[in-house]
Image (cartoon, rainbow, N blue to C red):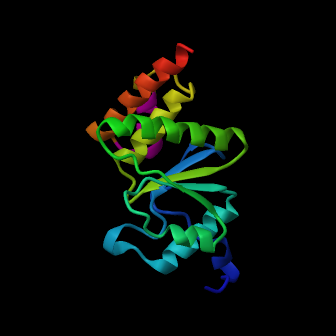
Amino acid sequence: MTTPKGKWAEGIPPRNFTWVLRDGLAVSERPGGYSRNHRKVRRHEEIIWLKVQGFTMVISLLASPHNLHAYDEQGLAWLHRPLGSGTERAGALVSLYQELHGCILGGGQVLIHAEEMDDEVAGVAAGYLLWSRRVPGPAQAIVAIERLTRRQLGPDGRELVAIATAAHASRSQR
């Protein structure tokens, strides 16, 4: 693709973009949109916007590796970290938090996305606030993410916060 000129050179923000930690962690739906609404041109413009804003990493929670090549094409680092289900989910979440924490502490700006801005994305972000000790407990993490995203965290998101609560407790014992 060619490099846009004029007002499009700045790109456009992904839909439902929300800062969780200003200049550190943000969440949104997948750049380009989800499912049948996905548009290659929009994806390109949103990735340009991420780069212009200083993002250094995109973490995709999608089960499939859809469109990860687009980040490579634009020179934006990415991690593909589907959480899975069952017993593997807790380990995947803790590993994700460790990678995310290292990137943020290193001065990186990270965007986490799934197909849509849903409970999984919001739950991961709320859990990270707890795991990284930025909030004192699960209730505060849930309230913080609900206020930031202006959406109620449902059962799937709360399950992720519960997993993070257990990881936070074991981390605190060290």
* 74 with respect to 40 (left or right): right
Residue 154 appearing in the image: no
Q: Position of residue 58 (x, y in %)?
A: 56, 56
Give the main secondary structure of the magenta stretch. Answer: helix
Q: Quadrant of the C terminus?
A: top right
Identify the residue at horizontal 58%, vertical 42% (top origin).
100
Identify the residue at horizontal 39%, vertical 34% (top origin).
90
Q: Position of residue 10 (x, y in %)?
A: 66, 71
**Relative depth, front residue between 32 and 11:** 32
Question: The magenta stretch spans which residues?
Answer: 141-151
Asked if residue 145 is among those painted magenta in the image, a careful observer would answer yes
Q: Compared with residue 12, is residue 105 higher up or lower down, i.e. above or below? A: above
* 117 with respect to 24 (left or right): left
Q: Compared with residue 34, is residue 107 higher up or lower down, i.e. above or below? A: above
Q: Position of residue 3 (x, y in %)?
A: 67, 82
Residue 170 appearing in the image: yes
Asked if residue 127 is among those painted magenta in the image, a careful observer would answer no
Identify the residue at horizontal 69%, vertical 38% (top origin).
105
